[in-house]
């Protein structure tokens, strides 16, 4: 996920087939829909997490930028957020380590006073065919992608319940966004640990949502499809791979990290106050069974 130099070199623009319209990217600005709120984004040194941290900052939130390995990416994300006028600091912690998670929340509550928004984003892939997958690869993915989200959600809910609703900040006592994936519903050969973790996130998210909704805590997921980040560089890094990826995406372009950032800012805001327990697919239609465009 690091190695940003290589990642930059591999960037390709949106490639389209000649009979289809040009890709036009949204040119929109971020309204201040999270002013006065305090957010923690896990895994925010690169990729989707970084874009979400920046978007929440732009929407007016103070942001804790959690990271584990990508120190420079986290520092520059925090700097960029501060340069736009809200507070931000970095916090190195392994989300799968209970003590480190508890410390991270305690520090945030000391420094920022409380937490309004948790974005449970930290996640990774350790791919292998089933027969070659080691127990270590299985455990690593489950413990970061699933257990890490549980540990952070638990701390956030404890604080949301303690503090309750402050109507001048938000209608809700707190918001949790779990970063899931289209692979919470699309099976993925060669990635059984990852797909199992995201399937787990889906029902964990819904069960927590059901449990804490009466306390005016909203819990939802964003389920991205193929987004241009280091995690899936192989799928978009050459024209050939990009074209073959397009077979899976009816909207015929890859998603950009900022698009997940915008979705997260909106979902965390009071514009989405009556939304609870959903998976918001941000995937250009990847979950529409594109194989059936021509068959069936
Ligand atoms: C995975 C990516 C993949 C995408 C669509 C994501 O959850 O992390 O590697 O490209 O799903 O398949």
Image (cartoon, rainbow, N blue to C red):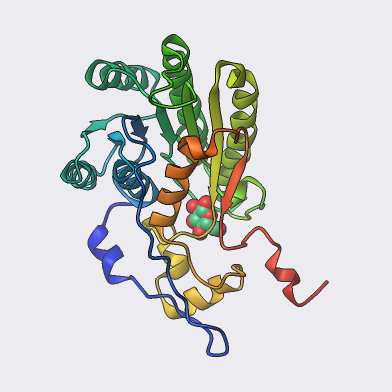
Residues 53 and 125: in front is 53
Q: Residue at x 56, y 35 (%)?
A: 220
Q: Is residue 45 visible?
A: yes
* Residue 216 lies in quadrant: top right
Instruction: Say which quadrant the C terminus sits in.
Output: bottom right
Q: Residue furthest bottom?
A: 18
Residues 133 and 293: in front is 293
152 w.r.t. 34: above or below: above
68 w.r.t. 100: above or below: below
Residues 197 and 66: in front is 66
Answer left or right for 107 relative to 281: left
Answer left or right for 232 relative to 44: right
Percent coordinates x, y for residue 277 in the rendering: 62, 33
Percent coordinates x, y for residue 102 in the rendering: 35, 17
Q: Residue furthest top?
A: 162
Answer left or right for 156 relative to 63: right
Q: Residue at x 46, y 59 (%)?
A: 227
């Amino acid at each position: 996920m690091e190695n940003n130099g290589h990642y930059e070199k591999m960037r390709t623009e949106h490639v389209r087939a000649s009979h289809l319209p040009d890709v036009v990217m949204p040119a929109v600005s971020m309204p201040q829909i999270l002013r006065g709120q305090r957010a923690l984004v896990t895994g925010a040194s690169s990729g989707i997490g970084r874009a979400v941290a920046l978007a929440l900052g732009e929407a007016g939130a103070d942001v804790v930028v959690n990271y584990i390995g990508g120190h420079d990416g986290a520092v520059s994300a925090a700097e960029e957020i501060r340069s736009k006028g809200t507070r931000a600091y970095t916090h190195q912690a392994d989300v799968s380590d209970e003590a480190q998670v508890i410390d991270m929340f305690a520090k945030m509550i000391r420094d920022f006073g409380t937490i309004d928004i948790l974005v449970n984003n930290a996640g990774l892939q350790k791919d292998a065919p089933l027969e070659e997958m080691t127990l270590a690869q299985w455990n690593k993915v489950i413990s970061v992608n699933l257990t890490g989200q549980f540990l952070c959600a638990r701390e956030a809910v404890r604080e949301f319940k303690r503090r309750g609703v402050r109507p001048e900040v938000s209608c809700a006592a707190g918001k949790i966004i779990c970063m899931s994936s289209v692979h919470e519903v699309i099976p993925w050969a060669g990635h059984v640990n990852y797909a199992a973790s995201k399937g787990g996130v889906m029902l964990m998210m819904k069960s927590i949502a059901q449990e804490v909704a009466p306390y005016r805590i909203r819990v939802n997921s964003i389920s991205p499809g193929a987004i241009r980040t280091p995690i899936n560089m192989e799928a978009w890094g050459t024209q050939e791979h990009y074209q073959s990826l397009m077979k899976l995406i009816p909207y015929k372009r890859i998603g950009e990290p900022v698009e997940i950032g915008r979705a997260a800012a909106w979902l965390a805001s009071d514009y989405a106050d009556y939304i609870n327990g959903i998976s918001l697919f941000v995937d250009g239609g990847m979950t529409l069974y594109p194989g059936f465009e021509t068959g069936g």
